[in-house]
Image (cartoon, helix red, strand yellow):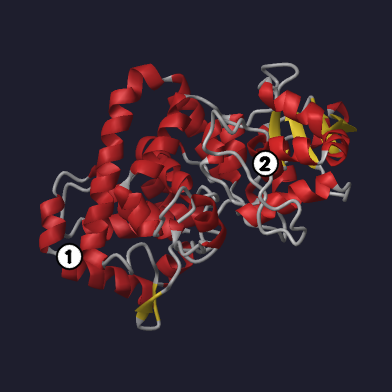
């Protein structure tokens, strides 16, 4: 089958994740409010030609890795190009100037539109990933590449190149939280894009590149998310970074989940050459822990909450965190395999009868109270099967303080 037709018709049949443990605007610190007067924001109308020039020069960061997580099918891409050819209005794009490189921009909103333009202008001779227009009601445009458009309809081509695209530029932004706030609000009510897209632009480095590659290569990650291609919502990256954060910095967690993930990425980017071996070893331990969880719970039930005599259809990030943490650090996985039936029964019992545990995996689970509760309760339960299990000290202390009060 033509890969473009396959991409156009393929449905997203991957697993959905529940909102428990999901990043949202509510957990952002308002550390930028007293510095808003320093922010410089202006609008400019870049032509299609000038935007392409910026992309080709690398001034707008569209890392090639982004293109493997393409959210738009061929028809949607083609309709954007058609709108520009005929001068129809399209939504604005939002860019933030990179603080480290003047004249270089991070994409806050509009990534798919920019990827579409970039693919349409790719050389047909040097790339297999160039865009050919398809699925349009205007048959004259169907089947055209940008070279064909220039040759066959030169006037339309010139109009296309000179079409303006409104761009909002943010300069001197005070903190990452400021850009995250804009990101969340722009995506309210639209396609559920992941904060990992913005994090990828804000925290570039070798660790982020490794996580991107690993999450796509891991058979275990693909199996639990039922992915047949890179996930444009980057949920696979989200799970992997969560794992590294809790695995290595769990006692630094203060309830600010977004900063927790950001700091993990910054730390491992900076320490990559010194910690690469450890990071790769932990990646294999993550795969092993996922296989163990599948063995205990079953591939269609793993990382889900037990409710009303069955497992929920959506994966639960909070459940993922505690299962993967303890099964990845334990040296006695054979004990868990031998006791997989009572372990599964214990988990189901928690989900049905322990109100503290139920609350800790149900909603608003990123705060310190709920995080410490689920880690402490489940860690204590697993110690019945492996007495070497160690509950993270800071979370355990916080949980005890909660119980005492």
**Badge number at residue 340:** 1
Is residue 177 shown to the viewer in this render? Answer: no
Q: Provide the secondary structure element on which disc 1 rests.
A: helix
Q: Disc 2 marks which residue? A: 145
Separation of disc 2 and disc 1 at Cα? 56 Å
In the foreground, 83 or 18: 83
Q: Earlier in the sequence, mark 2 or mark 1?
A: 2
Instruction: For label 1, count other residues whose C-alpha is less than 10 Å away and answer few (under 14), some (14-19) or many (20+).
Output: some
Residue 66 drawn at (x, y percent): 56, 38
Note whether 392 is above or below 386 in the view shown: above
Instruction: For label 2, count other residues whose C-alpha is less than 10 Å away and answer few (under 14), some (14-19) or many (20+).
Output: many
**Residue plotted at (26% across, 66% down):** 297
Note whether 143 is above or below 264 in the view shown: below
Note whether 133 is above or below 283 in the view shown: below
**Badge number at residue 5:** none
Residue 190 drawn at (x, y percent): 70, 58
In the rendered image, the residue lying farthest to the bottom is 308
The picture quadrant where one finds residue 170 is top right
């Amino acid at each position: 089958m033509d890969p473009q037709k396959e991409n156009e018709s393929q449905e997203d049949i991957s697993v959905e994740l529940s909102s428990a443990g999901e990043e949202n605007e509510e957990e952002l610190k308002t550390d930028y409010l007293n510095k808003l007067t320093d922010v410089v924001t202006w609008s400019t109308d870049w032509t299609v030609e000038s935007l392409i020039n910026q992309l080709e020069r690398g001034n707008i960061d569209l890392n090639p890795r982004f293109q493997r997580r393409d959210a738009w099918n061929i028809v949607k891409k083609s309709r954007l190009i058609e709108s520009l050819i005929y001068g129809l209005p399209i939504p604005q794009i939002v860019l933030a100037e990179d603080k480290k490189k003047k004249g270089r921009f991070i994409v806050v909103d509009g990534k798919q539109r920019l990827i579409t333009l970039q693919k349409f202008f790719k050389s047909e001779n040097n790339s297999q990933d160039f865009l050919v227009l398809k699925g349009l009601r205007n048959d004259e445009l169907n089947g055209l590449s940008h070279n064909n458009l220039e040759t066959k309809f030169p006037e339309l081509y010139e109009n296309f190149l000179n079409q303006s695209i409104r761009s909002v530029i943010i300069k001197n932004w005070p903190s990452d939280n400021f850009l995250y706030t804009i990101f969340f609000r722009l995506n309210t009510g639209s396609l559920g894009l992941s904060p990992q897209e913005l994090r990828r632009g804000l925290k570039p480095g070798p660790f982020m590149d490794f996580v991107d590659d690993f999450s796509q290569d891991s058979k275990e990650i693909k199996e639990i998310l039922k992915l047949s291609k890179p996930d444009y919502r980057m949920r696979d990256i989200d799970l992997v970074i969560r794992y590294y954060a809790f695995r290595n910095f769990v006692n630094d967690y203060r309830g600010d989940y977004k900063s927790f993930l950001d700091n993990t990425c910054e730390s491992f980017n900076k320490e990559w050459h010194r910690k690469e071996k450890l990071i790769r070893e932990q990646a294999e331990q993550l795969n092993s822990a996922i296989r163990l969880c599948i063995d205990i719970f079953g591939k269609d039930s793993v990382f889900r909450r037990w409710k009303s005599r069955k497992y929920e259809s959506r994966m639960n990030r909070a459940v993922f965190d505690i299962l993967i943490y303890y099964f990845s650090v334990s040296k006695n996985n054979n004990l868990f395999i031998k006791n997989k039936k009572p372990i599964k029964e214990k988990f189901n019992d928690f989900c049905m009868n322990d109100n503290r545990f139920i609350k800790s995996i149900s909603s608003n689970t990123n705060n310190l109270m709920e995080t410490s509760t689920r880690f402490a309760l489940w860690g204590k339960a697993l110690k019945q099967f492996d007495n070497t299990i160690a509950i993270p000290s800071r979370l355990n202390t916080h949980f005890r303080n909660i119980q005492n009060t």
